[in-house]
Amino acid sequence: FVGVEERGEPTMRFRAGPAGPARLADDIVRSGEEFSTALMRAVERGDAAEDRSRGHAFAHNPMTRAIQERFVTYAKRDWSQLRLVLRSSGDAAHRALAALVLGYAPDKQAVVEDLVNGISDPADEVRNNAMRALMVFADMDPAVSRNVPRIPPEPFIALLNSPVFSDRNKASGALMALTATRDPGLLATLREGSLASLVEMARWKSEGHAFAAFTSLGRIAAHSDDAAQAAWNRGDREIVIEAAIRQQ
């Protein structure tokens, strides 16, 4: 994937990085390093499945999940420090890990604003982790004991025009989750301001990375998810993409 900023097109500008002294506890840093290694090994073995029903990711892989279960403890224990690090630390690696662990906070709504702020961070990894946490929030199963957090779509829409792959990948994934309700206002905003980006992404050769944008286009085109999935399965993306374009 190569991103090219073209003259006359929207250009991403991120805020200046913070320079504060706040840092994460040593056990969180060690767990973050272990998590990166365990996750990479699981992915290499094709064991990347995860459960998002509770609003945070629990991997199918036992080693990865064991570390994620620690994150639940850390998010409760160090809630204030994690928020402080994400907003003010001069160390981008600590900010990125803080965004990851905040995704396991017991009160998801309470950290939405912090994670949305992380979407404008100048470091790619911080933005990636903040968007992923919010995307998983949006995928949670509602229950009597928990509500799906309210997540603003605008920061993700802006990043559909980013030349950075991880920005577009995570933004499209979050918007796939947020458009599941088929909110007319959100679909109209996507159609009017981001259709070209979604079309480009839906045509990516990497199917795993194209699917989220394709799904959002199916909803813009007023296709049912089942109909869009059927077109995808038979390799006929263009029928859905062209239907979305005609909605302009």
Image (cartoon, helix red, strand yellow):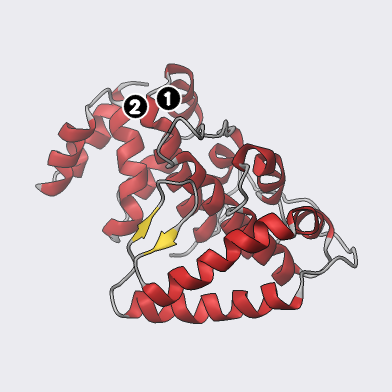
Q: Nearer the viewer, residue 143 or 122?
A: 143
Q: Residue furthest left?
A: 234
Q: Nearer the viewer, residue 64 or 97?
A: 64
Q: Position of residue 6 (x, y in %)?
A: 56, 50
Above or below, 13 against 143 in this view is: below
> Residue 196 bears which disc, if any?
none
Using the numbered discs, state the Cα–Cα distance from disc 1 to disc 2 in whole angstroms.
Answer: 6 Å
- The quarter of the picture where residue 91 lies is bottom right
Do callouts 1 and 2 mark residues in contact (Cβ within 8 Å)? Answer: yes
* Sequence-first disc among 1 and 2: 1
Q: Nearer the viewer, residue 13 or 167?
A: 167
Q: Amino acid at mark 1?
A: Leu
**Which residue is depicted at the point 45% across and 21% down?**
188
Does residue 10 appear in this view?
no
- The quarter of the picture where residue 163 lies is bottom right
Q: Position of residue 96 (x, y in %)?
A: 66, 64
Q: Which residue is mark 1?
A: 187
Does residue 199 appear in this view?
yes
Q: Amino acid at mark 2?
A: Ile
Disc 2 residue crowd, few under 14, some 14–19, many 20+, Cα 10 Å: many
Count up the numbered dots. Answer: 2
Q: Position of residue 58 (x, y in %)?
A: 43, 60
**Which residue is depicted at the point 33% across and 52% down?**
210
Residue 224 falls left or right of residue 1: left
Q: Which residue is mark 2?
A: 220
Q: Secondary structure at mark 2?
A: helix
Q: Secondary structure at mark 1?
A: helix
Disc 1 residue crowd, few under 14, some 14–19, many 20+, Cα 10 Å: many
The quarter of the rendered structure image containing the N terminus is: bottom left
Q: Position of residue 34 (x, y in %)?
A: 55, 80
